[in-house]
Amino acid sequence: MTVPSPPVPSPSAGSTPSADAPAPTRRWLPVGVVAGLVVLAMLVIVGLVVALSGDADRPPAPGAGAGEPMRASPAPSSVAPTTAAPLTAAPAPAFLKTIDYGPAPSGFPADPDPQSTVRPSEGLHPVDRTPVYDAPGGKPRAFLAPTISGVPLTMPIVERRSGWAAVLLPSANRTIGWVPPGDWETVPLRDLIVIERRSHRLIWLRDDKEMRSWRVTLGAPETPTPLGRSFVLGRSKLPGKVYANTDVFALGSLPENVDNLPTALRGAHIGIHAWHNDNSLGKYVSDGCIRLTRDAQRELLSEIAPGTTVVTVDR
């Protein structure tokens, strides 16, 4: 099943906010540059060109299949900021929507690497209502609040550019937004969850080392588990024994084929949760959510923090 109700607040597992991210400063050269400085600047430029001409290869994604040992994930994404002066952020109109549990506004760019298994090592937490843009220096499209449905919002940072940070957006699939320097702080992220759709495996990694893996149930053909990167938005408490009396992780992603869902679930998010029995493990029968055993879910609930990246891959 999908997760029909918003998450409720719960203590963050395994991570604490760091100090506010410092905003890059703008440096100005003197108007009168003497000839010696010009020569020095030319040498620096030549050195930068030489350094930038050899891009480092991206580490290969882990290739474990069903029954194979999981190899260590590539090194976490450091998302190093560029040295260029920060681009100016256009004022955001007050009438723009604040992203909540419902579908996010359109106009944002697609995730450039949706099935990457490189762990984002930092999350972004807004400390005030913060505009989010379609590009660095681009058009404001919405606002991000410090919480969604009372749960502190932390989004994985997947790129940095000119002082701006690109984050995986909540309430959207395979979509990023750009946040300018300002009212936000960073949170360290140590964990990564990989869902292998063909082999029905959930793999939990910490600091790029496999901790555990479990067989899972995934979405039926008419309501598939969405491919791509998302993240743990928070925890939900849902009534009844259908979830084995265990909390549910609500993810940032949404069902792909909303019209194929029961009416009551059309405002839901994709979730990771236990089920009242384990008969469907290894099958495609859910409404898009990831089901696993109660013991596995309880272990993840004790270890996984909001903002942790969850990537579903086609293998």
Image (cartoon, rainbow, N blue to C red):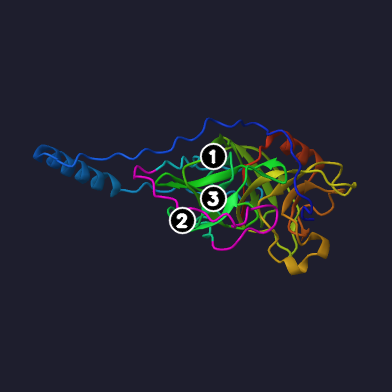
- What numbered label is drawn on residue 135? 2
The residue beneath circle 3 is: 131
Spot the residue most to the front: 94
How many labels, in total?
Answer: 3
Q: Do the numbered discs 3 and 2 sit on residues whose CB atoms are within 8 Å?
A: no
Whole-percent x, y for residue 27 in the image? 30, 39
Main secondary structure found in the magenta portion: loop
Q: Secondary structure at mark 3?
A: strand
- What numbered label is drawn on residue 184? 1
Q: Residue at x 46, y 56 (%)?
A: 135
Give the mark nearer the N terminus: 1 vs 3.
3
Identify residue type, mark 2.
Ala
Q: Which range is magenta?
A: 82-107
Q: In this rendering, is residue 95 above or below 215?
A: below
Q: In this rendering, is residue 68 above or below 315?
A: above
Whole-percent x, y for residue 274 in the image? 80, 46
